[in-house]
Structure formats: C-alpha cells, structure tokens
Amino acid sequence: MKWRLTDRTKMLLKLELAITLPAVALMAFGIWNLKNMQRDKAIEAAIQQNFRHVLMIAQEKTWDKANELIEPARKQFPNVNEGEAKIKEDLNRILRENPQFAYAIVYDKNCHIFVGAIQPNRAHDEGFWEHAQEAIDNTASWLPLQAVSMSDHLRMMAEKDMHYEFYGEWTSRHRRHVYSNEVFFIPPGVGKDEAAMALLSFDQDYLQDKFFPAVIKDVLHSSMGLRKASNQPAIMVHTPRDSEPWVASANWDGGKPEVEYSSDEILQGMVWSIKYTGTTIAEMGAKFLHYNFTILGAISLLMIGGIFLTYRNISREMNLARLKSDFVANVSHELRTPLALIRLYAETLELGRLNSKEKYQEYFRIIREESERLSSLINNILDFSRIEAGRKEYEFKETDLSELVRSTLDTYRFQIEQNGFTFEENISKDIPPVNVDREAIARSLLNLVNNALKYSKDKKYLGVSLYRANGSVKLEVSDHGIGIPPAEQEKIFEKFYRCGDPLVHNVKGSGLGLSLVRHIVRAHGGDVKVESAPEQGSKFTIALPLTRAQRTGEAMA
Ligand code: ADP
C-alpha cells in the first residue's frame, strides 16, 4: 500500500513547523539563557562591576578633595632661608587658617633646621597635643636619614606636575587604631641639590568627622544611577585591621560588603566597602532569575494554550470542510433518486398500460410522496442557506399548537401507517396559544417524524405527544428505532453531521434536519433535547416557552 499523508497529518506537520517549533525554540533559548546567567552569576558580576566603578570614583573624589585642602596650604609655606623663628610663626599661621591639619614640619639638612608646629586651635586638647608632639619627634628621628632620597624622588615627581607625596598607615596606640599620615613636599627657596622637606599631617578627627563623610555623600550622590527602586548603595570606610565601620553613610545597615577596595595612593590604608542596603547581590540575582523564570513559564503556558486553540480550530474547520463535501454528495444523491422515481412512474402512467385502478392510485401516491420528499429537502436546504447567511426571518403569530400538530400529522398519517408503523398521538387539551412561526414549527415536527421513520428497522413505532410542563409546551417525538450512541447525541445537532452507524449511511439524508430544528426552536426561545439508547429508540423533545402571563396563570392553577 502506498503510504500517503492524510490532510490531518499534513496539518499537524505544518502546525508543528510553523508554530510549535519556533515557539519551543524560543522557550528553550529563554531557559538556556537564564540558566547560563544563573551559572555564570552574570547579574551578580554586573552589579559588582558597577560597585567597583563607584569605588574608583570614590578614589578620584578623595584625591580631588585632599588636593583642594593641601595645595593652598603648601603654597603658603615659608622659605627655608627665613630663619627658624619666622618659619615657626608662619607654620602656626598656616595651621590656624587650615584647621584640617594636626601639625606641620619644615626641615633643611644644610641649615640644620627642624621646625615643628602643632595645630594652635587645639592647644587645650592634651591628648591631641601629646600625640602630635610624639609624631613630630618620631619624624625628627628618621627624616634626616631619608631626606636626600625623598627630595630626589619629589623633584622627579615635580617634573610630572605632582608636588607632594602622601603617606598613611594605621597603628595601634593605647588599644585604639590611630591613623598616622603625612604629606611631603619641597618647601620654597630650596636649591637644586639641597635636601629639604616640608610636611603636613591631616587631623584624624577631621578625616573621620568631615572629610570622609563629605566624600561618601558626594560619591553616593553622583552614583544615583545605581539606585534600584527599593535598594540604595551604602558605603563605608574601615581599617584593614577590623571590619567595623570607621566612617559610614547613614544607610549602612551592617552585613557583609559586596566589593572592597584598599586605597594605595592617597590616604593609604583606608578600606572602602560598598553594598546595597537591605539586600545582597546574591539575593537580587536570585530574585531577578526567579522573576524571569516565572514570566517565561507564564508566556510558555500562553503559547501552549494558543497552539492548542489553533489546533482545535483548524481541526474543527477541517471536519466541517469534510462534512460539507459529504453533504454535497448526499444531497445530489437525494435529489436524483426521487426525480428518477417520479420520472419512471410518470412514464409508466403515460403509456396507460396499467390494468387496475389501484395500480394507478399507487403510482400517483408514489409520485406525490416523492415530490413531497423533494420539496421538503429543498425547503431544508433553502432554510439552511438563509440561516447560514443570517437572513432567516420568522413570522411569530399566536398559534393553536394542538391544531398545528394535528393537521401536520394528518397529512402524513396515511404514509406512516402505510409503512407499517404503529402511530400513537397524544395531544393535551390544555395547550394555550403560543407565539410561533407556524411553518417553521411544522417543518421541525416533520423533520423529527421523518427521522423516526428513517431510522427504525423492525420495531416500527412512532409516538407524538404535545403537553404542558414547567412553564413551557413540550412536543415529543419518539421511536423504537436504531437509537444514537451517547457520544454522538450532542453532535447530531451540528450541521452536516450524520452518525457513523452503517445503517445511517444506507438511509438518505443531508445532515441538515436536526441543525435546522435546533435553530428554529432556539429562535423561539426554546430548546431541543434527545434521550436515546442504541437499539432502544430515541425521544426528541422540543420545549417552547410560555409567556410570563401564561406561566403565572399556571402557577396559580
Ligand atoms: P439526516 O438528513 O442525516 O437525517 P439529521 O440532521 O436529521 O440529518 O440527523 C442527523 C443524524 O442524527 C442522522 O444522520 C442520524 O444518524 C441521527 N438521527 C437523527 N434522528 C434519529 C433517530 N430518530 N434515530 C436514530 N438516529 C437519528
């Protein structure tokens, strides 16, 4: 057997190629991407990179601010040749005008001058004074030994427009961390080969209370871009010996710093730390991934839903297309058979060779019945096309349903009984007038009766009842025929649908009848239901609603 693709598999393949594959690829790529980010800790790395950048800015700002404080003082330093007294006086003046410094020194190897001065603004602070004096004495002990090499070094730096060198370190004194620091430069009036040195030292309290807080504030302000809606960066400076903040921004909330940087060019020994307040980078990374995974999941679900819906829609359309082509075949067949019969019997009659009157009667009856079948089929098709085009209009009129049902059945009674059917008719007497389209309701009844006749084998029974129940009028048509399997009981009301039973396919039909019945009944505000069991028979019930007045009348009765 040659293997061929059915339309359905073709459709599935196309759907697969056009929608499912790209969708799956997209989802897989999204997951792969996020997994990679998770594995490489890409988000964490990006934030750390930003933090590192902020700490670099902090270094630059420290330089700028220190420079602003050092340069004016440096330029006022006295000439080494002016004599010790004048030098001392000048140093005291400089210190008084620049309270950020703790002490100042001028040293000249040639003239054997070593002048030290302590911040006069803090003359009353004994501890401060003592510590400054100690530092000066200490410097006096090593500076003469280093002055030559240091002067050479500074001269070299001056060529690059750098006029001072900074030195700072943490020491312990009385169990306290103390920051010793000195700025070295060559004072004015020093000859080319002479070894002379000037020195300034920042007051530690000034650094802690004013200098670093100002720099930190400035840095945080200029790194606004790093702020997240709820998280702000916090910065602190601590000693290399412990991780207790020495100076911290107001929003520093403890915890482990994310990135640290030790300054090594200016104010050496300070360790800068940065983190986000209230969260860690790891937490933020996890949150970001979680959020993205959730969104990806939701989108994937939407996509799957979309694909499923598309698939369902397409297969429904395909089913309909198949049913339509069956319909065309069925209808052509249905038109042809009665026409052929009519022609055959008419021709026989025309020849006038029949010998009995009964035969003539029978042939006329067959011709009438076949033409009735033709017109009911054509009426169904016309109705159907009107409904499909949305042009079907109903003429509602107050109608006596008992009379309508009885007269419709009367025209068929003979035919029904001729076909060997037991016919039971039950019409209640209390049926109030109902607003209906006469012709449409009659056609619905005929369709149901016709089906009962068509789909019965040996147990030939037809029952029609009309009665009043639960605020509506019910019209029931039952048979003891082949029945309908439960799975198909809803589908038979769809257009073109015909049951899979082989017997059904031997019976002529278009699959339109019940869909018309349902449309008509619904247009009347009612509904049609079926109760059926295979081989047991079927019962179709049309329920037409009564008016409110009729219903309340019923309730009171
Ligand atoms: P058709 O022209 O095929 O009769 P209908 O819309 O009237 O179209 O009915 C749809 C299908 O429902 C039929 O093909 C048949 O399979 C099933 N059906 C309808 N009425 C009955 C019945 N009384 N007993 C068994 N099957 C029925």
Image: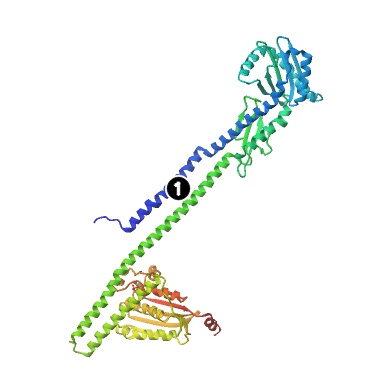
Q: Is residue 231 visible?
A: yes
Compared to 94, does 346 lie above or below?
below
According to the image, what is the colour scheme of the structure?
rainbow
Relative to 328, does residue 557 appear above or below in the rendering? Answer: below
Q: As drawn, is 403 to the left or to the right of 364?
A: right
Q: Position of residue 463 (x, y in %)?
A: 38, 82
To which residue does mark 1 refer? Answer: 27
Placement of the N terminus among the 4 image quadrants: bottom left
Is the C-beta of the residue carrying label 1 under 8 Å from the nearest atom of ligand 1?
A: no
Q: Quadrant of ligand 1?
A: bottom left
Q: Is residue 441 above or below residue 199?
A: below
Q: Nearer the viewer, residue 82 or 366?
A: 82
Neighbor class of circle 1 (other Cα within 10 Å; few <14, some 14-19, many 20+) is: some
Can residue 239 be seen here? The reply is: no
Instruction: Report the number of numbered marks.
Output: 1
| Quarter of the figure with residue 489 | bottom left
In terms of image quadrants, where is residue 322?
bottom left
Tell me: 229 left or right of 337: right
Where residue 118 appears, as percent x and y from the top left, is 77, 21
Q: Percent x, y for residue 522?
A: 45, 74
Which residue is painted at 25% across and 80% down in the image?
342
Q: Quadrant of residue 494?
A: bottom left
Q: Quadrant of the C terminus?
A: bottom right
**Would residue 509 appear left or right of 143 to someone viewing this image?**
left
Question: Which residue occupies 34% across, 71% down?
Answer: 511
What type is the residue that disc 1 sits on?
Met
Decide which of 163, 504 is in the foreground and name it: 163
Residue 347's x, y, as percent? 20, 82
Q: Residue furthest right?
A: 124
Considering every residue shown, the one lying at the far top of the view is 110
Element carrying mark 1: helix
